[in-house]
Image (cartoon, grey):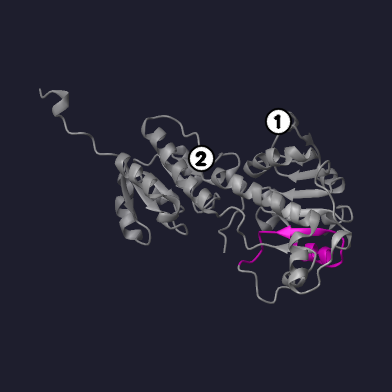
Protein backbone atom coordinates (compact mmCIF):
# COMPACT_ATOMS: atom_id res chain seq x y z
CA UNK A 1 0.00 0.00 0.00
CA UNK A 2 1.33 3.41 -0.91
CA UNK A 3 2.07 5.75 1.98
CA UNK A 4 -0.51 8.43 2.64
CA UNK A 5 1.87 11.12 1.46
CA UNK A 6 1.92 9.52 -2.00
CA UNK A 7 -1.85 9.64 -2.44
CA UNK A 8 -3.17 12.45 -4.64
CA UNK A 9 -4.95 15.24 -2.84
CA UNK A 10 -8.73 15.03 -3.24
CA UNK A 11 -10.17 17.45 -5.74
CA UNK A 12 -11.48 20.59 -4.02
CA UNK A 13 -15.25 21.03 -3.86
CA UNK A 14 -16.85 22.53 -6.97
CA UNK A 15 -18.49 25.94 -6.56
CA UNK A 16 -20.59 27.39 -9.38
CA UNK A 17 -20.83 31.15 -9.74
CA UNK A 18 -23.94 32.71 -11.26
CA UNK A 19 -23.94 36.04 -9.47
CA UNK A 20 -25.95 38.37 -11.74
CA UNK A 21 -26.90 41.14 -11.18
CA UNK A 22 -23.69 41.38 -9.20
CA UNK A 23 -20.51 41.25 -11.30
CA UNK A 24 -18.10 38.71 -9.84
CA UNK A 25 -15.39 41.38 -9.60
CA UNK A 26 -17.64 43.56 -7.48
CA UNK A 27 -18.13 41.10 -4.66
CA UNK A 28 -14.77 39.31 -4.74
CA UNK A 29 -11.71 41.48 -4.26
CA UNK A 30 -8.54 40.09 -5.89
CA UNK A 31 -7.29 38.79 -2.53
CA UNK A 32 -10.60 37.16 -1.63
CA UNK A 33 -10.93 35.63 -5.09
CA UNK A 34 -7.39 34.22 -4.90
CA UNK A 35 -8.09 32.55 -1.55
CA UNK A 36 -11.45 31.32 -2.83
CA UNK A 37 -9.80 29.62 -5.80
CA UNK A 38 -7.13 28.06 -3.58
CA UNK A 39 -9.77 26.35 -1.47
CA UNK A 40 -12.37 25.47 -4.10
CA UNK A 41 -12.70 24.61 -7.75
CA UNK A 42 -14.55 27.72 -8.90
CA UNK A 43 -16.39 27.87 -12.23
CA UNK A 44 -18.12 31.05 -13.38
CA UNK A 45 -21.28 29.97 -15.22
CA UNK A 46 -22.84 33.42 -15.44
CA UNK A 47 -24.80 33.74 -18.66
CA UNK A 48 -24.32 30.09 -19.64
CA UNK A 49 -27.24 28.00 -18.36
CA UNK A 50 -26.15 24.93 -20.33
CA UNK A 51 -22.78 24.88 -18.60
CA UNK A 52 -24.48 25.41 -15.25
CA UNK A 53 -26.82 22.47 -15.81
CA UNK A 54 -23.98 20.25 -16.99
CA UNK A 55 -21.90 20.92 -13.87
CA UNK A 56 -24.74 21.06 -11.33
CA UNK A 57 -24.67 17.34 -10.41
CA UNK A 58 -21.06 17.76 -9.24
CA UNK A 59 -21.52 21.09 -7.45
CA UNK A 60 -20.89 21.49 -3.73
CA UNK A 61 -22.33 25.02 -3.73
CA UNK A 62 -24.00 27.61 -5.94
CA UNK A 63 -23.16 31.27 -5.41
CA UNK A 64 -25.89 33.42 -6.93
CA UNK A 65 -29.60 33.76 -7.53
CA UNK A 66 -30.05 30.96 -10.08
CA UNK A 67 -33.52 29.47 -10.54
CA UNK A 68 -33.54 26.21 -8.59
CA UNK A 69 -36.87 24.44 -9.00
CA UNK A 70 -37.32 20.95 -7.60
CA UNK A 71 -36.22 19.24 -10.81
CA UNK A 72 -32.88 21.04 -10.79
CA UNK A 73 -32.34 20.38 -7.10
CA UNK A 74 -33.07 16.67 -7.60
CA UNK A 75 -30.16 16.53 -10.05
CA UNK A 76 -27.82 18.35 -7.67
CA UNK A 77 -26.94 15.27 -5.65
CA UNK A 78 -23.79 16.78 -4.08
CA UNK A 79 -25.19 20.26 -3.44
CA UNK A 80 -24.81 21.48 0.13
CA UNK A 81 -25.36 25.23 -0.09
CA UNK A 82 -26.92 28.03 -2.14
CA UNK A 83 -25.52 31.46 -1.32
CA UNK A 84 -27.60 34.41 -2.49
CA UNK A 85 -25.41 37.46 -3.12
CA UNK A 86 -28.12 39.95 -4.15
CA UNK A 87 -29.58 40.46 -0.71
CA UNK A 88 -33.04 38.85 -0.62
CA UNK A 89 -34.60 35.41 -0.61
CA UNK A 90 -36.61 35.06 -3.81
CA UNK A 91 -39.33 32.53 -4.68
CA UNK A 92 -37.22 31.10 -7.53
CA UNK A 93 -35.87 28.37 -5.23
CA UNK A 94 -37.93 25.36 -4.18
CA UNK A 95 -37.13 25.80 -0.51
CA UNK A 96 -38.94 22.71 0.84
CA UNK A 97 -36.99 20.51 -1.58
CA UNK A 98 -33.73 22.24 -0.67
CA UNK A 99 -34.33 21.78 3.04
CA UNK A 100 -35.41 18.17 2.59
CA UNK A 101 -32.16 17.45 0.74
CA UNK A 102 -30.02 19.12 3.38
CA UNK A 103 -29.13 22.12 1.22
CA UNK A 104 -28.53 25.30 3.19
CA UNK A 105 -29.81 28.50 1.61
CA UNK A 106 -27.92 31.56 2.81
CA UNK A 107 -28.38 35.28 2.18
CA UNK A 108 -25.93 38.17 2.23
CA UNK A 109 -28.24 40.66 3.97
CA UNK A 110 -25.87 41.14 6.95
CA UNK A 111 -23.24 42.63 4.61
CA UNK A 112 -25.51 45.58 3.82
CA UNK A 113 -26.74 46.29 7.34
CA UNK A 114 -24.08 48.73 8.50
CA UNK A 115 -24.12 50.74 5.27
CA UNK A 116 -27.91 51.01 5.30
CA UNK A 117 -27.97 51.93 9.00
CA UNK A 118 -25.45 54.75 8.55
CA UNK A 119 -27.36 56.04 5.54
CA UNK A 120 -30.67 55.89 7.42
CA UNK A 121 -29.15 57.96 10.22
CA UNK A 122 -27.92 60.47 7.64
CA UNK A 123 -31.39 60.75 6.13
CA UNK A 124 -32.92 61.28 9.56
CA UNK A 125 -30.47 64.09 10.33
CA UNK A 126 -31.23 65.65 6.96
CA UNK A 127 -34.94 65.59 7.76
CA UNK A 128 -34.29 66.99 11.21
CA UNK A 129 -32.33 69.98 9.97
CA UNK A 130 -33.33 70.51 6.32
CA UNK A 131 -29.75 70.01 5.11
CA UNK A 132 -30.42 69.08 1.47
CA UNK A 133 -33.39 71.46 1.25
CA UNK A 134 -31.33 74.44 2.37
CA UNK A 135 -28.46 73.38 0.10
CA UNK A 136 -30.84 73.58 -2.87
CA UNK A 137 -32.08 76.97 -1.70
CA UNK A 138 -28.53 78.30 -1.33
CA UNK A 139 -27.58 77.20 -4.84
CA UNK A 140 -30.69 78.97 -6.17
CA UNK A 141 -29.86 82.19 -4.32
CA UNK A 142 -32.65 81.71 -1.77
CA UNK A 143 -30.56 80.92 1.32
CA UNK A 144 -31.90 81.83 4.75
CA UNK A 145 -29.38 82.76 7.42
CA UNK A 146 -29.34 81.88 11.11
CA UNK A 147 -32.73 81.12 12.59
CA UNK A 148 -34.66 81.99 9.44
CA UNK A 149 -33.73 78.63 7.92
CA UNK A 150 -34.43 76.65 11.07
CA UNK A 151 -38.10 77.27 11.81
CA UNK A 152 -38.94 73.56 11.48
CA UNK A 153 -35.63 72.15 12.79
CA UNK A 154 -35.75 69.50 15.52
CA UNK A 155 -33.24 67.51 17.55
CA UNK A 156 -32.72 63.78 17.34
CA UNK A 157 -31.25 63.88 20.85
CA UNK A 158 -33.82 62.70 23.36
CA UNK A 159 -36.45 62.21 20.67
CA UNK A 160 -39.14 59.56 20.54
CA UNK A 161 -37.96 57.14 17.85
CA UNK A 162 -39.92 54.26 16.33
CA UNK A 163 -38.46 51.34 14.42
CA UNK A 164 -40.62 49.15 12.24
CA UNK A 165 -38.62 45.93 12.21
CA UNK A 166 -35.58 44.87 14.24
CA UNK A 167 -33.77 42.58 11.84
CA UNK A 168 -30.33 43.13 10.37
CA UNK A 169 -30.99 46.81 9.64
CA UNK A 170 -32.59 47.67 12.96
CA UNK A 171 -29.88 45.98 14.97
CA UNK A 172 -27.20 47.86 13.06
CA UNK A 173 -29.02 51.17 13.56
CA UNK A 174 -29.49 50.93 17.32
CA UNK A 175 -25.85 51.58 18.30
CA UNK A 176 -25.74 54.55 15.93
CA UNK A 177 -28.76 56.07 17.67
CA UNK A 178 -27.41 55.44 21.18
CA UNK A 179 -25.33 58.67 21.45
CA UNK A 180 -28.52 60.68 20.87
CA UNK A 181 -30.17 59.00 23.88
CA UNK A 182 -33.59 58.62 22.24
CA UNK A 183 -36.54 56.68 23.57
CA UNK A 184 -36.82 53.82 21.10
CA UNK A 185 -40.00 51.83 20.54
CA UNK A 186 -40.03 48.86 18.16
CA UNK A 187 -42.80 47.08 16.32
CA UNK A 188 -41.69 43.63 15.17
CA UNK A 189 -44.33 40.89 15.33
CA UNK A 190 -41.72 38.21 14.63
CA UNK A 191 -39.81 38.87 17.86
CA UNK A 192 -40.92 38.22 21.46
CA UNK A 193 -41.09 41.20 23.77
CA UNK A 194 -38.24 39.73 25.83
CA UNK A 195 -35.90 39.81 22.82
CA UNK A 196 -36.76 43.46 22.18
CA UNK A 197 -36.27 44.35 25.83
CA UNK A 198 -32.86 42.65 25.83
CA UNK A 199 -31.92 44.87 22.87
CA UNK A 200 -32.68 47.91 25.03
CA UNK A 201 -35.85 49.00 23.24
CA UNK A 202 -39.52 49.15 24.20
CA UNK A 203 -41.82 46.63 22.53
CA UNK A 204 -44.83 48.41 21.05
CA UNK A 205 -47.71 47.95 18.67
CA UNK A 206 -47.70 49.59 15.27
CA UNK A 207 -50.23 52.23 16.33
CA UNK A 208 -48.03 53.32 19.23
CA UNK A 209 -44.83 53.34 17.18
CA UNK A 210 -46.50 55.56 14.60
CA UNK A 211 -48.49 57.76 16.94
CA UNK A 212 -45.82 58.43 19.57
CA UNK A 213 -42.69 58.89 17.43
CA UNK A 214 -41.13 62.05 16.05
CA UNK A 215 -38.78 59.89 13.95
CA UNK A 216 -39.85 56.61 12.35
CA UNK A 217 -37.50 54.25 10.53
CA UNK A 218 -39.15 51.70 8.20
CA UNK A 219 -36.78 48.72 8.21
CA UNK A 220 -38.95 45.61 7.91
CA UNK A 221 -38.76 42.93 5.23
CA UNK A 222 -41.69 42.63 2.81
CA UNK A 223 -43.85 39.65 3.74
CA UNK A 224 -47.23 38.17 2.90
CA UNK A 225 -48.57 39.72 6.11
CA UNK A 226 -47.53 43.33 5.44
CA UNK A 227 -47.96 43.63 1.67
CA UNK A 228 -50.87 41.44 0.54
CA UNK A 229 -54.52 42.18 1.21
CA UNK A 230 -53.60 45.61 2.55
CA UNK A 231 -50.27 47.32 3.04
CA UNK A 232 -48.83 47.73 6.51
CA UNK A 233 -48.41 51.48 6.00
CA UNK A 234 -51.68 52.35 4.30
CA UNK A 235 -53.42 55.73 4.41
CA UNK A 236 -54.96 55.07 7.83
CA UNK A 237 -51.61 54.06 9.31
CA UNK A 238 -49.84 57.10 7.87
CA UNK A 239 -52.52 59.33 9.39
CA UNK A 240 -51.45 58.14 12.85
CA UNK A 241 -48.12 59.91 12.49
CA UNK A 242 -47.96 63.15 14.47
CA UNK A 243 -47.76 66.42 12.58
CA UNK A 244 -44.15 67.24 11.74
CA UNK A 245 -42.91 63.66 12.07
CA UNK A 246 -39.85 62.52 10.12
CA UNK A 247 -40.10 59.16 8.36
CA UNK A 248 -37.18 57.27 6.79
CA UNK A 249 -37.88 54.48 4.26
CA UNK A 250 -34.91 52.18 3.60
CA UNK A 251 -36.59 48.76 3.29
CA UNK A 252 -38.48 47.48 0.26
CA UNK A 253 -41.42 49.51 -0.96
CA UNK A 254 -44.27 47.00 -1.19
CA UNK A 255 -45.48 47.47 2.40
CA UNK A 256 -46.23 51.19 1.90
CA UNK A 257 -49.04 52.97 0.02
CA UNK A 258 -46.85 55.45 -1.84
CA UNK A 259 -49.73 57.48 -3.25
CA UNK A 260 -50.99 58.05 0.29
CA UNK A 261 -47.46 58.82 1.46
CA UNK A 262 -46.92 61.44 -1.23
CA UNK A 263 -50.35 62.97 -0.58
CA UNK A 264 -49.44 63.58 3.06
CA UNK A 265 -45.97 64.90 2.32
CA UNK A 266 -47.44 67.25 -0.28
CA UNK A 267 -50.00 68.45 2.28
CA UNK A 268 -47.21 69.20 4.77
CA UNK A 269 -48.35 66.60 7.34
CA UNK A 270 -44.84 65.19 7.81
CA UNK A 271 -41.44 64.97 6.12
CA UNK A 272 -40.05 61.80 4.58
CA UNK A 273 -36.86 60.41 3.09
CA UNK A 274 -37.24 57.59 0.57
CA UNK A 275 -34.50 55.27 -0.72
CA UNK A 276 -36.77 52.53 -2.11
CA UNK A 277 -39.51 52.94 -4.71
CA UNK A 278 -42.40 50.88 -6.10
CA UNK A 279 -40.99 51.27 -9.62
CA UNK A 280 -37.29 51.66 -10.27
CA UNK A 281 -36.03 53.63 -12.09
CA UNK A 282 -38.54 56.22 -10.89
CA UNK A 283 -40.38 57.74 -13.89
CA UNK A 284 -39.08 61.12 -15.01
CA UNK A 285 -42.49 62.73 -14.50
CA UNK A 286 -43.12 61.24 -11.04
CA UNK A 287 -44.57 63.80 -8.66
CA UNK A 288 -42.14 62.69 -5.95
CA UNK A 289 -39.47 64.65 -7.81
CA UNK A 290 -41.41 67.87 -7.23
CA UNK A 291 -42.20 67.58 -3.52
CA UNK A 292 -40.19 69.84 -1.25
CA UNK A 293 -40.91 67.81 1.89
CA UNK A 294 -39.29 64.69 0.46
CA UNK A 295 -35.61 63.72 0.47
CA UNK A 296 -35.01 61.57 -2.61
CA UNK A 297 -32.51 58.74 -2.88
CA UNK A 298 -32.04 56.26 -5.72
CA UNK A 299 -31.92 52.95 -3.80
CA UNK A 300 -28.30 53.48 -2.83
CA UNK A 301 -28.29 53.04 0.95
CA UNK A 302 -26.55 49.67 1.01
CA UNK A 303 -24.71 49.36 -2.29
CA UNK A 304 -21.28 50.71 -1.41
CA UNK A 305 -17.89 49.10 -2.18
CA UNK A 306 -17.26 48.08 1.43
CA UNK A 307 -20.58 46.19 1.57
CA UNK A 308 -19.98 44.45 -1.76
CA UNK A 309 -16.50 43.36 -0.66
CA UNK A 310 -17.93 42.01 2.58
CA UNK A 311 -20.31 39.79 0.61
CA UNK A 312 -17.34 37.98 -0.91
CA UNK A 313 -15.78 37.57 2.52
CA UNK A 314 -19.01 36.14 3.94
CA UNK A 315 -19.24 33.65 1.08
CA UNK A 316 -15.63 32.54 1.49
CA UNK A 317 -15.86 32.14 5.27
CA UNK A 318 -19.11 30.20 5.28
CA UNK A 319 -18.18 27.92 2.39
CA UNK A 320 -14.89 27.17 4.14
CA UNK A 321 -16.81 26.14 7.25
CA UNK A 322 -19.27 24.03 5.27
CA UNK A 323 -16.42 22.24 3.49
CA UNK A 324 -15.12 21.31 6.95
CA UNK A 325 -18.56 19.95 7.92
CA UNK A 326 -19.19 22.93 10.21
CA UNK A 327 -22.24 25.21 10.18
CA UNK A 328 -22.09 28.64 8.50
CA UNK A 329 -21.94 31.58 10.88
CA UNK A 330 -21.73 34.79 8.83
CA UNK A 331 -24.51 34.73 6.25
CA UNK A 332 -28.21 34.74 7.07
CA UNK A 333 -29.83 31.31 6.82
CA UNK A 334 -33.22 30.96 5.19
CA UNK A 335 -35.59 29.84 7.94
CA UNK A 336 -38.06 27.17 6.79
CA UNK A 337 -40.81 28.84 8.83
CA UNK A 338 -40.25 32.28 7.27
CA UNK A 339 -38.80 32.03 3.79
CA UNK A 340 -42.13 31.19 2.16
CA UNK A 341 -43.63 34.38 3.63
CA UNK A 342 -41.14 36.82 2.07
CA UNK A 343 -42.39 38.78 -0.92
CA UNK A 344 -39.11 40.11 -2.28
CA UNK A 345 -38.47 41.03 -5.86
CA UNK A 346 -35.24 42.10 -7.53
CA UNK A 347 -34.38 45.79 -7.49
CA UNK A 348 -34.66 47.69 -10.73
Q: Which circle's residue, 2 or 1, is located before the other in the chain?
A: 1
Q: What residue sits 52% from the left and 49% below the top?
A: 306
Q: Residue 276: where, in percent of width, then height?
A: 66, 59
Distance Cα–Cα, label 2 vs label 1: 21 Å
Residue under the point 16% across and 30% down: 7
| Labelled pair 2, 1 in contact (Cβ < 8 Å) | no
**Which residue is labeled 2 in the image?**
331
Left or right? Give the position of 15 relative to 148: left
The quarter of the picture where residue 151 lies is bottom right
Residue 102 visible to the viewer: no
Q: Give the magenta range.
A: 258-280
Q: Residue at x 62, y 60 (%)?
A: 299
Element carrying mark 2: loop
Judge whether residue 139 is colored magenta. Answer: no
Instruction: Look at the image and tell me in which quarter the N terminus lies.
Output: top left
In the picture of the structure, the residue carrying the numbered disc 1 is 195
Residue 89 image offset from top left, x and y in percent:
54, 49
Residue 262 within the segment the image draws in magenta: yes
Query: Which residue is more in the foreground, 99 or 279?
Result: 279
Q: Answer few, some or many: residues within 10 Å of disc 2's Cα (few below 14, many 20 plus, some between 14 and 19).
A: many
Residue 218: x, y in percent?
A: 72, 50
Q: Using the rendered image of the protein, determine whether residue 304 is visible from the camera's viewpoint.
A: yes
Element assignment for label 1 = helix
Amino acid sequence: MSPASDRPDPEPPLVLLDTAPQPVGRIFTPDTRATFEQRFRVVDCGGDPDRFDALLPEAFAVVGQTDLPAARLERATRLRAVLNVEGNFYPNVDYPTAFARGVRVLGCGPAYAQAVAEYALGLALDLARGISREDRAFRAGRERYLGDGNADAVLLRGADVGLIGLGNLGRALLPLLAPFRPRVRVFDPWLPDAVLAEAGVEPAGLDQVLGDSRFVFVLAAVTSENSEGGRLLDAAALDRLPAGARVVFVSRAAMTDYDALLDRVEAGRFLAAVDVWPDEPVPADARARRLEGLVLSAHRAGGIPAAFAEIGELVLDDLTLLARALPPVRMQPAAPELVGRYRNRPAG
